[in-house]
Amino acid sequence: MGGLAICLVASALLAVWIASPSGRTLAQIDAMHQQIAAQKTELQQVRDNAQRDVSRMAIKLGELQADSARLDALGQRLVVAGKLDPKEFDFNEPAGVGGPEKAVPPARSLPFDLTVSMEQLARRFDSQQDQLGVLQSLLTDRQVASSLIPSGMPINDGYITSPYGMRIDPFTGRESFHPGLDIGAYKGEQVHAVAAGVVTYAGVRPGYGNVVEIDHGDGYMTRYAHNNKLLAHVGEHVQAGEVISDAGSTGRSTGPHVHFEVWHDGKLVNPLAYVRR
Ligand SMILES: [Zn+2]
């Protein structure tokens, strides 16, 4: 029965693995949580039936121990798949969590080594559940954090027409500092927020024309300039990829494009490092 459960969980894991790269690790953790819960129930049943059939219990216990070992191996693979630091996260070590000790009534009538084995296995299941909880929260935190860090292009399949840094100014012909990336777009093309955040400005700024600014928290701000039409409003929460404006050529611009800036802690940074993520 334990073997069958492992097979079912393994097929379910394979299905989610193929289905979605982003949510699959968390889905796997859910599956493992369910598996461990089922095994704990089985262990309890073994305990309850123990007096009746000691030898059958020993076989069952062996199966559960094997299942537990497989879960350890699976957990280690998740650490690798989730690109977590294996040092930070060790399935073979108990998780660093507290809580009151649960008093387990001793099954005095059972052979000593079987009782000890069952207690060890029960503790191992508890530890595996704790570790999965830690893994789950680490991955969830990181998913949230990564949706706030600027990544990707404001224009789908956009190409860079002018890089960040020193360049020849297209209006003066003199060398000057260009504080963002220019990304080619046609007039009216959708401009996307590169990360989740709150719109802090939507209006005209000298030189920038119609501009949208988004605060992403954690010191990050992005700016999208020269828009034809603004769609986002100040105070609005936007998601990563949400359409915030239509591209255009307002302000100091030679033709339709998005001038895209990334600020971190009040300083301009090269957006290229973020769009390449
Ligand atoms: Zn520009």
Image: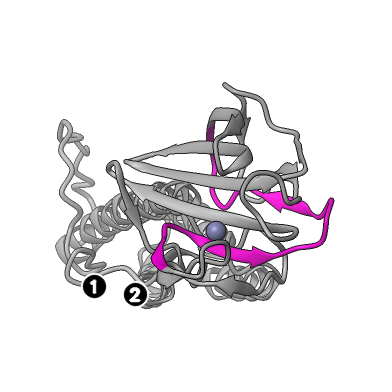
- The residue lying at 21 percent from left, 60 percent from top is 120
In this view, the residue in front, 105 or 161, is: 161
Question: Is disc 2 surrounded by few (<14), some (14 to 19) or many (20+) residues within 10 Å?
Answer: some
Q: Is residue 102 above or below residue 13?
A: above
In magenta stretch: residue 181: yes
| Residue marked by disc 1 | 86
Q: Position of 113 compared to 53: left or right?
A: left
The figure's colour scheme reads one colour
Of labels 1 and 2, earlier in sequence is: 2
Disc 1 residue type (three-letter)? Pro
Q: Is residue 160 visible?
A: yes
Respond yes or no on whether mark 1 lies under 8 Å from ligand 1: no
Residue 143 screen position, x and y as percent: 46, 53
Q: Position of 206 compared to 62: left or right?
A: right
| Residue 149: assigned label | none
- Which segment did they paint magenta? 175-198
In this view, the residue in front, 208 or 72, is: 208
| Residue 76: assigned label | 2
